[in-house]
Amino acid sequence: MVTIATKNVRFSYGSTPVLEDITFSLDTGTILGLVGPNGSGKTTLIRCIDKVLQPEGTFLIDERDIQTMRRVEIASKIGYVPQNGARIAAATVFDVVMMGRTPHMSWRLGERDLDRIEYAIRLLGIEDLAERDYNELSGGQQQKVLIARAVAQDPNILLLDEPTNNLDIHHQLEALATIFDLSRSTGMTVVMAVHDLSIAARYADMLMMLKNGKVVAIGRPEDLITPERIREIYGVEARIFQDPEAGLIIAPLRAVPELAL
Ligand code: ADP
């Protein structure tokens, strides 16, 4: 089944076009990696899927026009982990993760809500942080809490904007493996903006390459990632290796001055 389908989606901040002619469809359970240089429109596209922004064109979630969906409906289907730890009014980690239950909760916390909160806290391995003040945590710890909040939400679609930005490589791999396993075990669709191409190639089923607000290519990482494309999109010469366990490894060699972005 198709979870997200768009046709000729366009978005402008004021009179500046930022997304143009975005057309794609995503099957349920797919992990889509959004890649592309800074300013190519990855965050904007993620915010359109969450209906924080309202683009023109056709945008369907589970075959329904997103325009007709109310905020609470979107929130019950879609979890969103913003970039670089959102600022949140003073709250404990437990309270922040509990916020993920808001779209499902009645006026009080039910047993199912509590189960999901505890599950999410355990899944992200942040039990020892549960009583701490969220705002006193490191960027990486905050990032994990926000992922846990989205997991507690029990979404069909999980949107992640640079989920590993603040994490060291140990925690990067841990967080991505958690998201990958969760998607495989529950059929959750994932859309994540990722800077590191090797990480994107390893954890995503499909990649969408964006440049200047347009889709340059979409497909399986092994079909998409070539030295020519990396040169075209990033203005960088790169070498590509295949490791039996790590998959594709993209090693950038040098920026090509005449291809400055
Ligand atoms: P990416 O996530 O790929 O770095 P963004 O979606 O953040 O790209 O940005 C795409 C373009 O939109 C950039 O040129 C950026 O400057 C512009 N942009 C982003 N947010 C705003 C905003 N709130 N107002 C005006 N322009 C914006």
Image: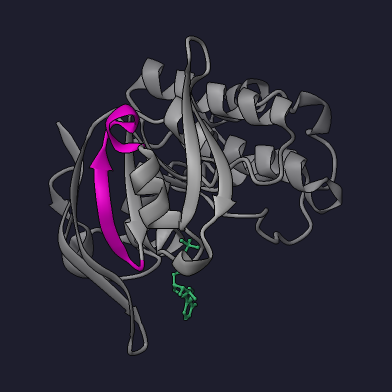
Residue occupying image coordinates x 40% and y 24%: 183
Q: How is the image coloured?
A: one colour
Residue occupying image coordinates x 34% and y 50%: 209
Residue sitting nearer the eye, 24 or 100 = 24
- Residue 82, given in percent of the width and then of the height, sits at 55, 54
Residue occupying image coordinates x 74% and y 41%: 140
- Residue 229, given in percent of the width and then of the height, sits at 34, 47
- Residue 143 falls left or right of residue 110: right
Question: Could you tell me how many numbered marks the image carries?
Answer: 0
Residue sitting nearer the eye, 124 or 102 = 124
Residue 17 placement: quadrant: bottom left
Q: Is residue 142 magenta?
A: no
- Residue 80, given in percent of the width and then of the height, sits at 48, 49
- Residue closest to the far bottom: 15
Residue 87 placement: quadrant: bottom right
Q: Is residue 214 magenta?
A: yes
Above or below, 66 against 228 in this view is: below
- Residue closest to the far top: 244
- Residue 63 falls left or right of residue 202: left
Above or below, 84 against 218 in this view is: below
Extent of the magenta region? 212-225
Q: Quadrant of the N terminus?
A: top left
- Residue 90, given in percent of the width and then of the height, sits at 79, 58
Asked whether the viewer can see residue 111, the reply is no
Asked whether the viewer can see residue 57, the reply is yes
Residue sitting nearer the eye, 1 or 161 = 161
